[in-house]
Image: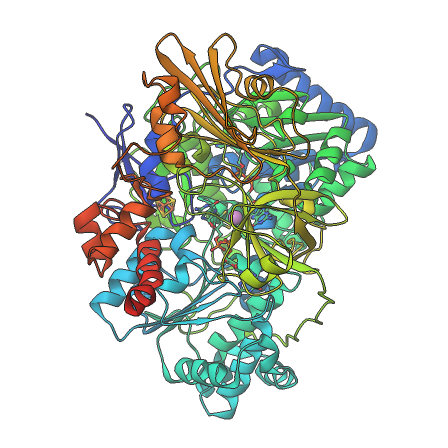
Amino acid sequence: MNLTRTVCPYCGVGCGIMAGADGTIKGDPEHPANFGRLCSKGSALGQTIDLEGRLLAPQIGGRDAGWDETLDLIANKFSTAIRDHGPDSVAFYLSGQLLTEDYYVANKLMKGFIGSANVDTNSRLCMASSVAGHRRAFGTDTVPGTYADLEQADLIVLVGSNLAWCHPVLHQRIAEAKSARPSMRVVNIDPRKTATSALADTHLRIVPDGDISLFNGLLTYLADTDALDQHYLKHHVSGGLPAITQARLGDPLESGLSHDELEQFYQLWAGTKKVVTVYSQGVNQSECGSDKVNAILNCHLATGRIGKPGCGPFSVTGQPNAMGGREVGGMANMLANHLDIENPDHRAKVQEFWKSPTISAEQGLKAVDLFEACASGKIKALWVISTNPAVSLPDAEGVAAAIANVPFVAVSDIMARTDTGDLADVLLPATGWGEKDGTVTNSERRISRQRAFLPAPGQARPDWQIICDVAARMGWSDAFGFSSPAEVFAEYVALSTATMDFGRDLDLSIFADADYVNMIPTQWPQNDKRFFANGGFYHPDGKARMLPVSTPKASARDAFTLNTGRNRDQWHTMTRSGKAPRLGAHLAEPYAEIHPEDAAALAISAGDLIELSSPKGTSILRALITDRCARRQLFAPMHWTRQQSSAGLVNNLAISVTDPVSGQPASKANQVSARKFGAVWFGYAVSLRPMRPDCTYSAVARTLTGWQGEFAGLEMPDHWGELARGLMELGSCSASEVHDEHGQQTRIAFHDKDQLTGLFFASPTPVSLSRTHAVSLIGTSTPPLHALAGRSGAGQLDPGTTICACLNVGVNTLRDAIGAGATSVEALGAITCAGTNCGSCKPELERLLEDMRPAMAAE
Ligand SMILES: Nc1nc2c(c(=O)[nH]1)N[C@H]1C(S)=C(S)[C@@H](COP(=O)(O)OP(=O)(O)OC[C@H]3O[C@@H](n4cnc5c(=O)[nH]c(N)nc54)[C@H](O)[C@@H]3O)O[C@H]1N2
Ligand SMILES: Nc1nc2c(c(=O)[nH]1)N[C@H]1C(S)=C(S)[C@@H](COP(=O)(O)OP(=O)(O)OC[C@H]3O[C@@H](n4cnc5c(=O)[nH]c(N)nc54)[C@H](O)[C@@H]3O)O[C@H]1N2
Ligand code: SF4
Ligand SMILES: [Mo]
């Protein structure tokens, strides 16, 4: 089998992959991000490349259309809006999952040719606070760290990062470094206990947004204990004194930590030269996200702990090309190639290089404002590319209404049905991962080639080409006459060279003669270059700035604080990861983590549903009772959409509160009220065919044998059989229905000749039966009555919820192995194989061992 070297399309670690058209996926042993490792999502990519659900032809108003007709229509609608209402009446909303070449041409079209800066991206929801923090401190958006720093550090502080689930290969690299060098320390700062806390020596459970108090306290401690680097401060930093003075005004105890916890952490930080502080959405997605970033940067600048091996602040990017998007300037407040939109010299140079008729002179609308402008009628034509804002933005229902309010909406996606695509006038079929060529930049500034190994399906075209085709039809064929991504990349590199006189960080000259076809993963400006060890910042005086930051005013929080984030085995709105049965097995349903005492107070027991409400909307989720969450705090995943669930979308609870500097929404601290959802019946179904999430409560997911669904309702249906048929779309299959003697439990088996095609179970309490076993029966010739027994066959262990997605090992199998004497992750691997493929589940194995240890000791 011929394998193609490419990169993983999921997270910002940017792992190298060797992929084959038959679905073979292997880690690339030569890629410096992963050296052959992959996580569960990367390993399961082979299950996501089929054409099921793909958008294969352009659509206008729901009908298939030809490319010429569609492109003409878009060009016409945009040109007309610009003519009648000015350039700011149109907008692009892009994505950190676009390739650099796609991003570059979209930004060029909007800023240089249309003449508006209304081009923003989902990076606004993701990295904007880090970008703002970097620019305030360094004068440019530079990430000084490299992955090797993580292995060389003596202390790694993970702030607001669930690395074990969200950047699993970096987590694996740290875990390996730590086991080789046990003196290495890891501290995890998160209001919630996560899989990442398991790796950490210390988990500091701060209050939500307690970060500034904590890091201001650290800065004060460093100043008071003579731990500052006076030489570095004198020569390379300005603003040290005001920042320290401001920090002193805060009270570190407001972080929610005890005096002892603070003292120990401060001592450790002050006493360890090689510190890397890794931070992610717990920092960025906050009302004070930019200030949190600067509070962290202040401590590194004050101690000169930046840019040296094993040292530095490290904002890890979420999406595979979040970094590339920032580089090409694909955000409303940047120009291109790390140049400033406000700077007339920068603008003149870029305009001259682009030979463009115009250049936008001021910032455009940032994501949340952009969709508000859609709601108010200011935006007349909108093009959404490679992102799903009707799910991922706060006030998701409001955003959906805003999109519906725009007179003309085009959506480019790889899938036919998404919550955003469902609102579009025109759908454009894009080629997806595996089918398209280009480059991406990962968290450590490494540019890698994504290479196609599959043919473009149907009429799908690469995003850069669709954008250029529209630009040409708007009258700019010369400037957008690219015939390959290689040509786009060459222009992007040439722009960096042309603007080198401005002395910015983004120097791509190393790629000037790059062989695009065979390009090897390379960091800009050169491999292993660390910025700022000897100063050289990008403010006019060449110094970095420490910024005075103050603790945010505690908002009244009498309700619950809903924290949101990610699951190990799903990617965002699940359009791709949701296709992989292996991944669906990990956490198959939208849930809310709730503390046992809060659950008790709301009379919620295991398996019950919880209803969350805010002024914006309501969600119904399965209650997951756990002390991983602190009291009055909840956590729910962001993944579920209207496509798989009736009430699992959590962003419809969010009010659009944003950081005033970065415009990034505060997705981690939504104020909600909670109560038990008073379902009178609960249902569970497995089926050979897709199910509809068409019930007061419903959530459907892929399984190894088809689909499964969880349901619940507020009223007893008249006919269970009709209800089940409606949800399961099993048409002409015959049904066998069984009721228990009290008429409480209903069980229905559907079969087509000998084949079992569906099972439906309903009960007045949460349906308790082995999901794994039910799933395993679908498609077999098990007799209906036997199947309706609904439990594992006699003597056969129910493996339980899947923990190891690669090798399909369930929690009960693991518990058994621990009961039989397995005391380590390695021993569990040897007995059950769990964790021996990609290793993403190791933190959960660790946690299971930890959870069972006290119980066993007590026996
Ligand atoms: N499996 C998986 N991996 C992914 C993704 C995915 O969808 N699925 N998406 C990718 C993307 S785009 C991104 S941006 C990254 C995100 O990666 P992460 O930022 O690591 O993930 P999140 O789960 O969003 O949030 C991280 C943590 O922030 C904590 N937190 C909440 N509030 C606070 C606070 O006030 N202070 C602190 N210190 N912590 C807080 C949360 O409890 C949570 O554990 O993941 C990337 N990787
Ligand atoms: N509550 C809450 N909300 C959040 C977050 C949170 O932590 N909590 N996190 C935020 C963050 S950090 C992020 S990054 C966003 C992510 O949110 P989104 O970007 O909205 O989510 P995705 O599901 O990644 O959307 C990508 C879309 O692009 C499509 N696609 C995939 N490949 C291609 C391609 O090659 N071309 C085209 N044209 N389309 C393609 C996919 O099918 C999918 O529809 O969510 C944000 N929203
Ligand atoms: S860590 Fe996993 S999701 Fe992220 S790039 Fe690597 S394989 Fe892909
Ligand atoms: Mo993100």
Residue 682 seen: yes
* Image coords of residue 74 (percent x, y): 66, 21
Q: Residue at x 41, y 49 (%)?
A: 442
Q: In which quarter of the image is ligand 2?
A: top right
Please tell me whether residue 143 is drawn above or below residue 297 in the rendered image.
above
Please tell me whether residue 384 is drawn above or below residue 153 in the rendered image.
above
* Image coords of residue 335 (percent x, y): 61, 48
* Image coords of residue 125 (percent x, y): 60, 49
Q: In which quarter of the image is residue 562?
A: bottom right
Q: In which quarter of the image is the N terminus?
A: top left
Q: Which of 5 and 599 is in front in this view?
A: 599
Q: Residue at x 21, y 45 (%)?
A: 833
Q: Which of 69 and 554 is in front in this view?
A: 554
Residue extending furthest front?
741
Q: Residue at x 33, y 50 (%)?
A: 841
* Image coords of residue 189 (percent x, y): 48, 68
Q: How is the image coloured?
A: rainbow
Please tell me whether residue 492 is drawn above or below residue 661 in the rendered image.
above
Q: Left or right of 534: which side holds 828?
A: left
Q: Left or right of 298: which side holds 75?
A: right
Q: Nearer the viewer, residue 392 or 115?
A: 392
Q: In which quarter of the image is the C terminus?
A: bottom left
Residue 393 seen: no
Q: Which of 752 and 9 is in front in this view?
A: 752
Please tell me whether residue 779 is drawn above or below residue 616 in the rendered image.
above
Residue extending furthest left?
830
Q: Left or right of 798: which side holds 65?
A: right
Q: How many marks?
A: 0
Q: Left or right of 485: which side holds 682?
A: right
